[in-house]
Image: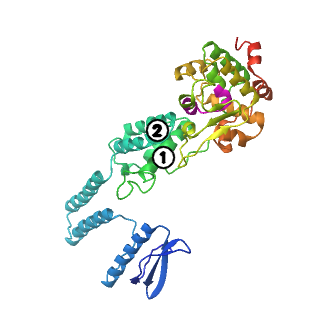
Amino acid sequence: MKGRFEGIIQKVNAPKYSEKYGVWSISLKENGKWTSVWRKDQSKADELYRLLVKRMKSNGLGIDLKPTTLSQKQLEISQLCFNRLEANEFLKMDDDSTATKMLSAVDFFIQHYYEHEVPKVKDVVQMFLEKQEQRNLSEFTLRDYRNVLSLFVVEYAEARISMIKPMDCKKFVQEKVSPNNRKHRQIYLKAFFEFCCGKNNPYCEDEAWLRKNPVNWELPKIEANEITCLTYDDIVKLLRLSFQKGLLGFYVFRLFSMMRREEHLRFVEIGGNKVEENNYINLDERRITINNQVYKKRSSYENRGRHYNEIEDTFMEWLHYLKDNNIPISASKRDEQLIRNLVKGKKRNILRHTAITYHTLKFRDPMRTAYVAGNSVEMIQRHYLNMNVPKDDIKRFFELTPTKAKKIGIID
């Protein structure tokens, strides 16, 4: 039973815990018949018990209480507005101007109530961004939240959050022409309004600021574009340029390890900038460890992480080459962007896309690739895998050892 009772309650027994079923049970007598209701949480059981006792006492006084979804504050303002309107009817005022003034007074009062009870958009956005900054979000995700919501604040800064309507959200999303940009706006805006509806919102006191998310429509389905991925010739050009700039170790490591950029930054910062000194690289066991300090994925679990076990032969040769030549595996964001701009494909995830694509097509084991890359098979299929890479490119990439690289002029 859900605990909604429409009859007359004569008696209510305090909650009792059932060891057998692991629930709190409340027995009550309604309309002369005994029934029971249960809750798994003790605090919810106690709250329901208090409500039922209040209902029982009101029944004893001849008062029939009805269940409602309104809060106490909303009931108070509703009653006050009703009283004002009822007074207008009681006085039987035929003067239209007087009736209009009274209705205007009610409207003003409601507006005045909202102004004191619900925060403004600009304030809620600030609260939301402060909360997001405390999570383990990537710098790019935080940047996107700031960009989208700063534009939303430009249009609705002084508006009360409760006054934002679905059409306002739709208009904001559709300001973008590109379907991908519209989807981008919708995702971040919807997450913001979920916060306003009370989801993980520590700022709501008695109740959420909104009862329903105003971003409540679906964008039309769009055709997915081909996933950007480097060709073998692009990779050769990239490695040749990186060698000339002293960044070979960074690009080799990213192309074979499949790490995210943020993971690689932490991998180097915590573990070390050289293969020999990095605590997470074990060449004897052919293993690279990406623990929870490096992985740092959003989760309630503390022991998250993964291993790159049985490192592939070509990658192993490169790791030994980097170790023997004391080559660092890091690069500044500026240096990385400078070289990548000279090669086909400027998408910021192109290195990870390429690494995951080539590994998946080489070993034909998406589960293995997903584990090493730290995502899921579904995510690889949807966002990372370019299935049109020629087989010859895959073969030549995994034959590109330091010895082969020297022969074709990548390294000296």
Instruction: Kindly report the distance in space between the C-alpha atoms of the residues bearing marks 1 and 2.
Output: 9 Å
Element assignment for label 2 = helix
Res. 9 in view: no
Residue 278 position, x and y percent, is: 60, 28
Residues rendered magenta in the picture: 253-266
Residue 173 position, x and y percent, is: 48, 41
Question: Which quarter of the rendered picture does the C terminus lie within?
Answer: top right
Q: Residue at x 48, y 49 (%)?
A: 215
Res. 88 in view: yes
Q: Quadrant of residue 407?
A: top right
Q: Is residue 83 above or below residue 239?
A: below
Residue 245 has which mark? none
Whether tag 1 and tag 2 are in contact, CB under 8 A, the answer is yes
Q: Residue at x 54, y 31 (%)?
A: 270
Residue farthest bottom in this picture: 32
Using the image as rendered, state which of residue 205 and residue 410 is in the foreground: 410
- Lateral position of residue 298 relative to residue 89, left or right: right
- Main SS of the magenta part reads helix
Q: Is residue 179 above or below residue 7?
A: above
Element assignment for label 1 = helix
Which amino acid type corresponds to the residue marked 1 in the rendered image? Ala
Residue 241 position, x and y percent, is: 64, 15
Using the image as rendered, state which of residue 340 and residue 106 is in the foreground: 340
Residue 191 has which mark? 1
Query: Which residue in the structure is indicated by mark 2?
Result: 145
Which amino acid type corresponds to the residue marked 2 in the rendered image? Tyr
Residue 102 position, x and y percent, is: 22, 61
